[in-house]
């Protein structure tokens, strides 16, 4: 995404296109995998830690960003698809964490993940798979 499309996307979601939101979404759109918080913080060092954390949470609440992984030492964040909204994150993918390079990727599956629990209303399912990624297997 370029800067203009990011600003339009934020406005569609009823959010102001602040410099930190635009910079964060530019950074995330340029990555092929989920980004750990420390990497985001390193690239956006002009913004303080609290502002960055609050910005990420606003984008999560707006259905623009999701937590791709919370296990391990860091939280990883990735862009949502346009189907996600303020009221519902629609993720039909798994989060794959490579045990070698530590990269976290959002991988779409051919069949939708269906989970049903009697007497419960499921709003979101998150699946994390750990193993060795294709790049590390080739090395």
Image (cartoon, rainbow, N blue to C red):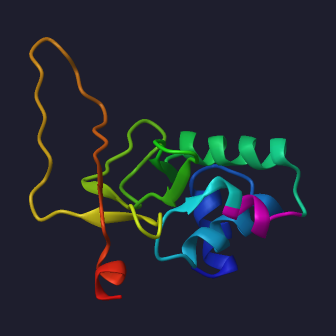
In-front residue for pair 125/63? 125
| Residue 128 shown in magenta | no
Residue 131 appears at what percent x and percent y?
A: 29, 61
| 9 with respect to 100 (left or right) | right
Quadrant assignment for the N terminus:
bottom right
The number of callouts visible is: 0
Q: In which quarter of the image is residue 47?
A: bottom right
Residue 76 appears at what percent x and percent y?
A: 53, 53
What residue appears at the point 55 percent right and 44 percent down from the top-left corner? 60
What segment carries the magenta color? Answer: 39-45
Residue 93 appears at what percent x and percent y?
A: 27, 56
Check the image and report above or below for 61 versus 65: above
Check the image and report above or below for 136 versus 70: below
Check the image and report above or below for 113 versus 6: above
For residue 18, say whether it is visible. no
Check the image and report above or below for 4 versus 84: below
């Amino acid at each position: 995404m370029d800067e203009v499309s990011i600003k339009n996307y934020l406005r569609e979601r009823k959010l102001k296109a602040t410099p930190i939101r635009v910079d964060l979404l530019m950074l995330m759109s340029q990555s092929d995998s989920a980004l750990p918080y420390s990497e985001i913080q390193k690239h956006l060092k002009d913004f303080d830690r609290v502002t960055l954390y609050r910005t990420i949470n606003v984008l999560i609440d707006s259905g623009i960003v999701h937590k791709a992984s919370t296990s391990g030492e860091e939280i990883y964040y990735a862009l949502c698809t346009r189907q996600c909204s303020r009221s519902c994150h629609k993720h039909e993918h798994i989060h794959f964490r490579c045990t070698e390079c530590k990269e976290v990727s959002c991988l779409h599956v051919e069949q939708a993940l269906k989970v049903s629990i009697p007497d419960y209303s499921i709003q979101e399912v998150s699946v994390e798979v750990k193993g060795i990624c294709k790049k590390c297997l080739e090395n």
